[in-house]
């Protein structure tokens, strides 16, 4: 059984749902940190609720209603590209892809709360979902005014087709690098910084790194007086976050080869964890010592 609501109500509900989904996803995206983990969880489940509500409403609404689920068709897309008549079917394709990717992102996040091996796939899908969302917004903006503006100011000989625009928006270069090379580059950067701070610097020390890992401090968070509070005494073992209770993958490179290969992530972890344990920022030498110790574990 299907039904329709007054057009104004359907449009209002659709706008509300867009705000609900987009707002929840963006909040979840920017709160993916242990200090805001509760908000991250809440927003993630709000995304799942939005997806569930959309599915429920979409299956009962009549075809033609803006609340009905999008039905992308390859045949319809080909026909439109040839004839250029009717509503652009890329609207449906974009909506369906966005719906699916955000749904997988939210579902994998919920499962990753118990199965930590899903954390990396969840983060990867979430990055993809953000890109698709921005592409969707750009596409809709372009189709509802941007195209006319572009034609007015640049007057291209041939209009840019929506298909080409969509491909351009979603295309992202993929860079492949070996983990060791990236880790070496990070250590090289810390070497330059350490030598600038202390001209007598003679290199990083695994022994100093181990002392830093096992030492107990008093200046940070009472829940994390040492690195071992979360990572255990054995850096090759799976740890557990002392604040959230979530499992943490091993910190030792031998047990977790991807450790210390992403410069942004490394800085983020040191910036947060050093303050949590020591109550201050770590020095470049301390960071290099710590990584050097973990390289041998």
Image (cartoon, rainbow, N blue to C red):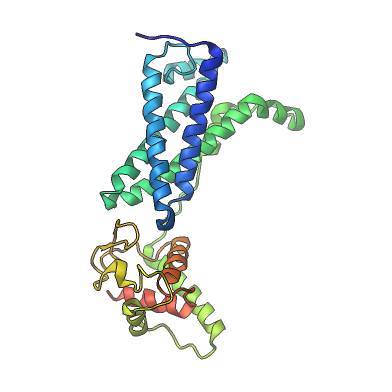
> Can residue 252 be seen in this snapshot?
no
| Point 75% across, 28% down: residue | 152
- Front-lying residue, 208 or 22: 22
Residue 95 lies, in percent from the top left, at 47, 27
- Front-lying residue, 228 or 260: 228
In the image: residue 144, left or right of residue 41: right
Quarter of the image with the N terminus is: top left
Residue 194 lies, in percent from the top left, at 51, 81
In the image: residue 160, left or right of residue 225: right
Which residue in the rendered view is the most extreme toward the right?
153
| Point 38% across, 74% down: residue | 291
- Front-lying residue, 54 or 135: 54
In the image: residue 160, left or right of residue 213: right
| Point 48% across, 19% down: residue | 77
Quarter of the image with the C terminus is: bottom left
- Placement of 218 over or under 144, stated as above or below: below
> Can residue 169 be seen in this snapshot?
yes
- Placement of 82 over or under 15, stated as above or below: above
Residue 48 lies, in percent from the top left, at 37, 35
In which image quadrant can residue 141 be found? top right
- Placement of 114 over or under 261, stated as above or below: above
Residue 130 lies, in percent from the top left, at 48, 41
For the image, the number of numbered tags is 0
Which residue in the rendered view is the most extreme toward the front?
222
| Point 32% across, 61% down: residue | 241
């Amino acid at each position: 059984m299907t039904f329709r609501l007054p057009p104004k109500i359907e449009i209002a509900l659709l706008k509300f749902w867009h705000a609900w989904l987009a707002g929840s996803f963006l909040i979840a995206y920017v709160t993916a940190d242990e200090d805001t983990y509760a908000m991250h969880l809440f927003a993630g489940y709000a995304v799942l609720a939005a997806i569930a509500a959309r599915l429920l409403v979409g299956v009962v609404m009549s075809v033609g209603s803006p609340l009905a689920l999008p039905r992308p068709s390859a045949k319809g897309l080909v026909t439109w590209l040839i004839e250029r008549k009717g509503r652009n079917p890329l609207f449906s394709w974009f909506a369906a892809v966005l719906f699916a990717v955000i749904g997988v992102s939210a579902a994998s996040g919920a499962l990753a709360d118990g199965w930590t091996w899903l954390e990396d796939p969840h983060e990867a899908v979430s990055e993809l979902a953000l890109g698709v969302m921005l592409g969707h917004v750009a596409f809709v903006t372009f189709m509802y005014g941007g195209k006319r503006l572009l034609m007015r100011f640049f007057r291209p000989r041939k209009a840019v087709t929506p298909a080409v625009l969509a491909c351009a928006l979603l295309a992202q270069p993929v860079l492949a690098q070996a983990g060791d090379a990236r880790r070496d580059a990070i250590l090289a950067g810390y070497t330059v910084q350490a030598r600038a701070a202390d001209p007598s610097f003679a290199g990083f020390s695994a022994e100093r790194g181990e002392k830093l890992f096992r030492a107990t401090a008093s200046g940070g968070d009472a829940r994390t007086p040492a690195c071992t509070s979360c990572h255990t005494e054995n850096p090759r073992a799976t740890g557990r976050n002392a604040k959230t209770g979530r499992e943490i993958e091993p910190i030792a490179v031998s047990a977790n080869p991807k450790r210390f290969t992403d410069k942004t992530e490394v800085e983020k972890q040191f910036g947060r964890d050093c303050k949590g344990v020591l109550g201050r920022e770590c020095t470049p030498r301390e960071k290099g010592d710590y990584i050097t110790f973990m390289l041998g574990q």
